[in-house]
Every structure is written in structure tokens, then in C-alpha cells.
Amino acid sequence: MGENDDGCSTQLIDGNGEFNVKGLDNFVKKTKLSDCGLSYAVVAIMGPQSSGKSTLLNHLFKTSFREMDAFAGRSQTTKGIWMARCVGIEPFTIAMDLEGTDGRERGEDDTTFEKQSALFAIAVADIVLINMWCHDIGREQAANKPLLKTVFQVMLRLFSPRKTTLLFVIRDKTKTPLELLERALREDIQKIWDSVRKPEAHKNTPLNEFFNVMIVALSSYEEKEKQFEQEVAELRQRFFHSISPGGLAGDRRGVVPASGFSFSSQQIWKVIKENRDLDLPAHKVMVATVRCEEIANEKLRDLATNESWLELHEAAEGGLVPGFGKKLSSILEKYFSEYDAEAIYFDEGVRKEKRLQLKLNALDFVYPSYATMLGHLRSNALESFKIRLEQSLNQGEGFAKAVRDSQQSCLMVFDKGCEDAAVKQATWDASKIREKLCRDIDAHTFFARSAKLSELTANYEKRLTQALSEPVESLFEAGGKETWPSIRKLLKRETETAVTDFLDVVTGFELDHAKIDAMVQNLKNYSQSLVEKKAREEAAKILIRMKDRFSTVFSHDKDSMPRVWTGKEDIRAITKDARAEALSLLSVMTAIRLDERPDNIESTLFSSLMDGTVSAASSHNRSVGTSTDPLASSSWEEVPPNNILLTPVQCKSLWRQFKSETEYTVTQAISAQEAHKRNNNWLPPAWAIVLMIVLGFNEFMMLLKNPLYLLGFFVAFLLSKALWVQLDIPREFQHGAVAGVLSITSKFLPTVMNLLRKLAEEAQGKTTQEVPDLSASQTYRQQSPSHSISSTISESVASNISSAGDDAEYSSPSPALVRRRNTNNVQESEISQM
């Protein structure tokens, strides 16, 4: 029996009870068991000798355990305990084949190894298969009874027994129903459990507290091989996801992490061989302690020989190392993470204790390099201060300013260097080194007050100007309910930032508090006056902003796409929305609102200008000589006079001007809608077309039989079209049906006479031009009898449209009329082409 490429069969314990440590380590390495964490299961099988245990495992898990040769007679084939990986089973599952019981090779009295191997299987395995013959069920002296007694006895030797699944496999089942066999077997199991002597602690403990008992029956392998293989295949499916809730071992307890399986198995067998009681909880802690300590020591050794650490340590000895803290933190985190990954499934208390010890040892190991880095930072900062101070004094700067700048610069560099050198996993404090640096600086210099406060103030005012001007202007352009809150927030943030920075700088001047407070107040007043100035500038341009806002909302849909007036849009609602947006912008610019004081300006403007209550109230009260117009005032009630940008009267005037300048846009949209409707409604309804086709079928057939009628109708259509265009019938009926009929009646006869006259002139002109080439002209007339008539009608239509333009009702035609004329010109062109 050698090793298999798939299952990696390995003898774990030989017949003499020797544990194969090297073989187990090779098995773990080859199958990568250590990477499984807690996601693995162990299945063991025990039963009488030559009962087909190895055969069952090989069929069930695709392993290659040695099987008995039936032609060589019954004899012992499995000695000791063998193990192999179950092929194709998820999660990772280990199969253990135990030496058979009641074998003649060991004799009747040598049951020590049998009990030891049974205890080992119970302590290690999650599922134990009990292989037994069908004919042994119900027999008092059956081969399985000593085995069951052995299992129950060794189970009670565990200080804290595991919850193990006992799967009884009944071999060579007969015609007896499985229900009867199972009932008889369970009765036998219960009797054996009751007969076993138990400790006081478990005297009344039921069997199911320690075991999950399951029973399955298989046909004879030799007599019904196909049926046997089918039943084994069904049983194999139950071992998939066996450790999941509801699986065969779903409620198991006290699992050892896969990385500790080898050490745990060795220690369990050692305790069993020494005939000591096996305390599983203590064993679990012991395994965790040994393994976590081994992992921690391994990581510490790896850290000491890490090339990145050695390079970093050497560089720190030579001088400053940029990014020292991040680099060292990364190296430490690498080994801490590796420890966590390898020790994650061991006892939590032990794991955390050993990790803390690893962390302390690692930090103690790298601390000298960190201290060296702080020493470099302190000496470099002190040297930098001396050089900068000397250079500033040589350039004629004031002593106090030179001291302040030099000290601030070197301390800032030192602090940044400390931050850069800080190790994330440590809580080392660099404050003492910083204090020593300050004492060294104080030893070389002493402070005095001198500064160019006006220059400093100008710099901060410039900074505020840059921070506020463009953002405030942008907020005013956007104009909305959040404009002033956003401006207040911006003003507060930028002012507080500037004041904070200003105080940080001015503190070094050692000025009295009153002077500092006055300078800070001036800075705040400047930022506020800057915003007010911008507000007044934007208020002067409010009409332009309102028209732009109206145009944007009116001419674009909610997706910011240009509107196409197809006749489906609600122009009234769109106009109202656009005006509301413009009025909202006007309400924003009526007053300066930096004090967060509530006002009713927006609601007043909307109720007065949008709802039309002002006009109605004014007209109603004119008769009684009173006025309740809320906009008939030069101030707002809630706003101080110095914060007013636009008075109510000005708002009313601006709104009137705004409406007058935007009405043309609305009129254009309405005209576009009407034109679109006319252009799309020239056909009669579909039902009318169908009716005309049905009722006019006979007339259509008559036209086809007599083409002269068709020619006559064509000429009549051209004349009617010319009269339609020349009389401009759609425009005449815009003012009502009666007015349209009267107007058309008065113009009809002159228009017909004018049209006939043009036709006559057209015919005479054509005759004169066609004399030189009479034959060609006659040929052409024969081919195109209607061409001259079409040309004559086309010219007369153009002439009459020109005369109709002279008689227009308005001296300045509207855009809609211009579009209608353009449409008529297109129609005339079509008529002439016909």
C-alpha cells in the first residue's frame, strides 16, 4: 500500500503504536491542509476485521486503501491507522482507516491497541463510521457489541467529550425492512450505553448528548455490486458540506485549526499511549499556546533577517530617512498580519496574549532605530535654526521677526519629521525630544517684539479677497434659497480660518490682548464689507440676471436640452415657472442677509407680483382712495436700512420692466406652437379619407375611363389652389367665420378676373416667343398640354400675393404672418412645378 497522487494515503500510526510524524507532516504539506483553517472534516471507520471497511472507504471517498484479497482468505489487511484525503469532497475531508477489531492476529486478550485507536478516532474524528454485518443485529454475541462498548467507554474518558456523529453502516442487508433493522439496532445501542459504567457527572446523561446516531444499510458488494455502488454514491452525497449547519457534523464542537492538526494529533496519541485521561479543553489551550508561540517566534526571527528592515536600519544610522515611520509600520504590519492569519483559529485568549508579546518584542527590537531618527531630527532642526537666524540678521531683518520665523520653521520641520517617523503600531511620545529642542533654541536666542503688522494685515486681507470674491460672485449668479446661507457659511469658514491663522502668527509678537482683539475685529469687518460690496455690485445687474434666468428656464427642459415647441407644451405653466425662478433671484438680491435674521421678502414678492394680488387690491381700493400694496414702500420691515439693496418700489419697477422685456419670448413660443399645429393638421381625419375612398369609387373609375375629366379636375385644382393662396383663406378666418366669408366674398370676383387676365397675357406672350420654332413648340404642347397653364397660374399667384401684401392690415407684419408667407411661397413653388 503506497502513496496515491490524489488521496495521498499515509500510515499515521503503525501496528506497534508508533506515530508517523514525518509522514503526517508530508501529508499536511502535500495536501495544503494548513490553509484550510476550520474548514475541514475528519471521518474515521472502525469495525470487525475483514468486514470491508477499506473497500467501503475506497468506493465512498475514491481513496486507495489496501483491500482484502478474497481468494487469499480472511486476514488482516489494515495494520495500525491509515489516512488519506477524500477525493472530490468539499470541504477538505480526511478519511482514517482503523485496524479491524477481534482479529486473530492480535489474539483475544490484546485489546489495548483496539481501545487506544478507538479513543484516538473519537478524539480526532468528526464522523465515525461503524461497519457491521446485517446478521449481527439483534444477536447477543455479535461482533459489533464489544466494539460499541469500547467506543462508549473511551468516550467517557474525555474530560469534555466532543459531539461526534456515529454513522452505522449495515453491510449485506437482507429483505428485512430497514425500519425494523434500525429499531432493533437502536435498542441494542441503548442497552449497551446503559450497561457502560459512567462517571458521576454523566450518570444520567443521555446518549444523544455525546453522539448523533445515524443508520444506513448497503447491499452486498460481492452479490449485488451495481446496487452496492449506487447506494454508496447516494451515501457519498451526504458527506458534501458535512460541517455546514444541518450536515453530518454540523453541530461539532472544539475543532482544532488545520495548521495545528499535526501537533494536536501527536499530543493526543502521546496522552493515549501514556494511558492518561484526555482533557480536550486543556489540550486545545496547550496546542494553541505551543503553536501561537512558535508562530510568534518565527515572525520575530523573520523580522530580524528581513532585508527591507536591515536596509532601513542602516539608512537610519547614517541620517534622516524620508517616510521612516510608514516603511517601518509596513514591515511590522506584514508580520503581525501573517501571525493573525496563521493563528486566527486558535484559542482567542492564547492568540491575543501571544500577539501582544510579539508586538512588544518587535517594538523593543526596532525602538533604537526610531530613537536614532529623533536624534537626527533634533540636531538638524537646531542647526537649521542657527543658520536661518544668522542669515536673517545679516540681511537686516528685525531680531524678533528673525527669531520667530526661524523658530517656527525649525519646529514645523521637526514636527513633520516626527510625524513622518511615527510608527503606527507604537505609542511612542516625541514630546520630550521636542522640549529639549526648545530648550536648546532658548539657550541661543531670546525673544523681542517687532513686526510689520500692516504688511501682515494686508496679506490676510488679500487672502480673504481671493477666498471670497469669486465664490461669492458665483453664488449670487446661481441665486436661490441657499444663496445667503451658503454665503454666510463661506464667510464664516474663511474668516475663522484666516483669524485662526492670523492669531497663530500674531501670538509671537507678544502684543496685549486688546491690540490683538482689535486687529482680529478689523479683519472680520473687512471680510464682511467685502461681501456687502459684492452684493451691491450684483444688485445693480439684477435685471440682466433675471432675464438670463428666465431665458434659461423657459427655453430649456428639465434635462437642460433646448425646447422644441411642438404644441404639447404648457406654455402658461412654463412661463410661470420661469418667472418664479427670476422672482426668486430678485428676492435674493433685495437685501443683505448676513445676520441670519428671518424675513418675509420672498413671500411678499411672490404674493404681490406672481399671484397678482397687488393689481387687484390697487384697482379695488382706488375708489376709496386707500392703498394696501405691500410694495408701495421704500423699505422692508424686517431689514435694517443699511442692509437694503433694492427697495419694494424698485422691485416692483424692475418686475414690470422684466415682464415687458420677456413677453416677446413668450409670444414667439406661442406663435411657434400655432405654426406647428397648422403645419401638422392639413389632412382630414382618417375615417373621412376611408369614407371618401368608398363613396367615390365609382367617380374614380369614371375618371380612369375618361382622361378628359381627369385633366379638367387637375386644371380646376390648380385654379382652386391659386385662389386659396391668393385670398389667404386661413388668415381671413382667424377673425371669425362671418368676417372671413364677407372678406372672401368681396375679394373673390376681382381675384378671379385678375387671374384670367394673367392667363391671357401668359398665353399671348408664349405665342409670340414660339413663332421661330413652331414645329418644336407644337410638339412640346402635344406632350405637355398643361405646362403653360401651370406657369401662368404660378406667375399670377406670385403677383397677387404681392398685391395682397400691400393691402395687409398691419404696416409691420408679425413673425407668424412672415412664416405664413414663407409657407405660401413654398406652396406656390410646388404649384409651378406641378
Image (cartoon, rainbow, N blue to C red):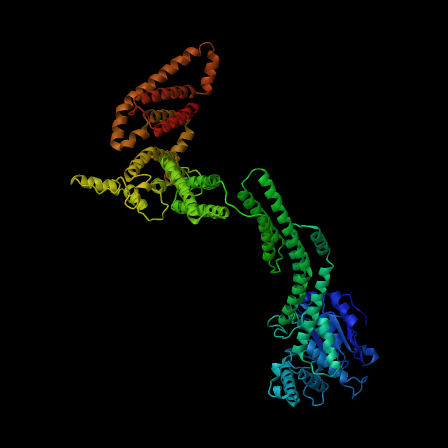
The quarter in which the N terminus is drawn is bottom right
Residue farthest toward the top in the current orientation of the protein? 772
Q: Name above or below for residue 740 compared with residue 144.
A: above
Query: Which image quadrant for residue 20?
Result: bottom right
Residue 730, percent from left and from top: 32, 30
Residue 834, percent from left and from top: 43, 25
Viewer-nearest residue: 775 or 679: 679
Viewer-nearest residue: 368 or 305: 368
Residue 223, percent from left and from top: 74, 77
Query: Which image quadrant for residue 673?
Result: top left
Does residue 603 appear in this view?
yes
In this rendering, position of residue 775 left or right of residue 754:
right
Q: Name above or below for residue 608 compared with residue 90.
A: above
Viewer-nearest residue: 540 or 434: 434
Q: Residue at x 29, y 25 (%)?
A: 810
Q: Name above or below for residue 292 compared with residue 373.
A: below
Q: Name above or below for residue 343 compared with residue 566.
A: below
